[in-house]
Image (spheres, helix red, strand yellow):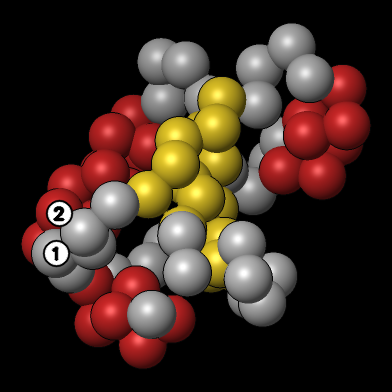
């Protein structure tokens, strides 16, 4: 059940999201940078960072904390 973190380059909130994933002890996840991808920018542009379960499609929009990330797992 891999997680995906949708983020942007030079994004302070994305840096904070990475810290939250570390606090939640997420074993592995994929990082997807939406910059330059029209479809992803249309979907996630104002929402990043977003954590998504690739198996169920469930998503967490920022702000989220370690507890909500663990609940998503």
Relative to 47, residue 71 above or below? below
Badge 1 marks a residue whose secondary structure is loop
| Residue at the extreme bottom of the image, as rendered | 71
Please tell me whether residue 64 is drawn above or below residue 72 in the rendered image.
above
**Residue bearing mark 2:** 22
Q: Quadrant of residue 61?
A: bottom right
User: Would you call the spot at circle 2 few (<14 residues within 10 Å), some (14-19), or many (20 or more)?
Assistant: few
Secondary structure type for disc 2: helix
Q: CA distance from mark 2 to mark 1?
A: 5 Å
User: Which residue sits at x=43%, y=81%?
Assistant: 72
Question: Residue 56, position in %: x, y?
Answer: 66, 77
Mark 1 and mark 2 in contact (Cβ < 8 Å)? yes
Residue at the location (41% across, 15% down)? 10
Q: Horizontal placement of 31 versus 46: left or right?
A: left
Quadrant of residue 24 within the rendered picture: bottom left
Residue 45 on image: x %, y %: 72, 35
- For label 1, the crowd category at 10 Å Cα-Cα, with few meaning under 14, some 14 to 19 and many 20 or more, is few
Vertical placement of residue 60 versus 42, above or below: below
Residue 61 appearing in the image: no
Image quarter of the C terminus: bottom left
13 left or right, relative to 23: right
Viewer-side residue, 55 vs 67: 55
In percent of width and height, residue 8 lies at 53, 25
Q: Residue at the spot x=14%, y=64% of the render?
A: 25
Q: Which residue is mark 1?
A: 25
> Does any portion of residue 50 appear in the rendered image?
yes
Q: In the displayed structure, does residue 22 sit left or right of residue 40?
A: left
């Amino acid at each position: 059940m891999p997680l995906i973190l949708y983020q942007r380059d030079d994004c302070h909130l994305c840096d904070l999201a990475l810290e939250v994933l570390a606090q939640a002890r997420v074993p592995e996840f994929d990082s997807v940078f939406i910059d330059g991808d029209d479809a992803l920018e249309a979907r996630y542009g104002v929402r990043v960072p977003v954590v998504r379960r690739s198996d169920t499609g469930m998503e967490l929009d920022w702000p989220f904390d370690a507890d909500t990330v663990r609940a998503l797992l």
